[in-house]
């Protein structure tokens, strides 16, 4: 019986994960380690991600993060879902998805 409940829970989680409606976004500029500019002029941040800013003392790490973001995110169509964030202002907080 315990295995049946576990199976039902996993199935419902999988169903929720694949039933979301994704939108498409294209990042054209990397402003900071977790601040991007979309093709439509919208500021975009990754939700629930804290990174070292460019202005931090450990700029070596931030340079690596920016280099990775430019390689993996910039000028590519990416799927995303929006999240609700308090005090987000004009910034869109998202979960990005990319097929590798």
Image (cartoon, rainbow, N blue to C red):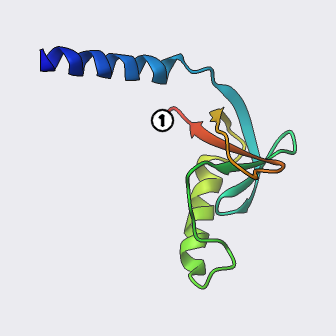
Q: Quadrant of the N terminus?
A: top left
Q: Nearer the viewer, residue 43 or 28?
A: 43
The percent coordinates of residue 31 (x first, y second) are 76, 61
Residue 95 lies in quadrant: top right
Which residue is found at the position 39% from the left and 21% from the top?
Answer: 14
Q: Looking at the picture, does residue 35 appear above or below residue 26?
A: below
Residue 34 lies in quadrant: bottom right
Which residue is found at the position 43% from the left and 16% from the top?
Answer: 15
The percent coordinates of residue 33 (x first, y second) are 64, 63
Tell whether 64 sits left or right of 9.
right
Read off the residue under disc 1.
100
The percent coordinates of residue 62 (x first, y second) are 59, 71
Q: Looking at the picture, does residue 79 appear above or below residue 69?
A: above
Q: Nearer the viewer, residue 42 or 4?
A: 4
Give the class, few, some or many, for how many residues have Cα within 10 Å of label 1's Cα (few <14, many ≥20): few
Which residue is found at the position 63% from the left and 80% from the top?
Answer: 56
Extreme residue in the bottom direction: 57
Helix, strand or loop for disc 1 = loop
Which residue is found at the position 57% from the left and 65% from the top?
Answer: 51
Tell whether 98 sits left or right of 82.
left
Q: Nearer the viewer, residue 52 or 63?
A: 52
The percent coordinates of residue 11 (x first, y second) are 33, 16
Q: Looking at the picture, does residue 58 appear above or below residue 15?
A: below
Tell whether 33 sits left or right of 49.
right
Number of numbered discs visible in the structure rendering: 1
Tell whether 7 sits left or right of 40.
left
Residue 98 lies in quadrant: top right
């Amino acid at each position: 019986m315990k295995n049946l409940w576990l199976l039902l829970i996993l199935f419902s989680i999988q169903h929720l994960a694949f039933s979301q409606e994704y939108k498409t976004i294209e990042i054209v500029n990397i402003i900071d380690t977790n601040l991007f500019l979309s093709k439509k002029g919208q500021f975009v941040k990754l939700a629930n991600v804290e990174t070292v800013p460019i202005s931090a003392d450990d700029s070596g790490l931030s340079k690596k993060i920016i280099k990775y973001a430019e390689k993996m995110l910039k000028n590519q169509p990416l799927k995303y879902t929006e999240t609700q964030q308090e005090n987000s202002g004009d910034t869109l907080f998202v979960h990005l998805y990319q097929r590798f």
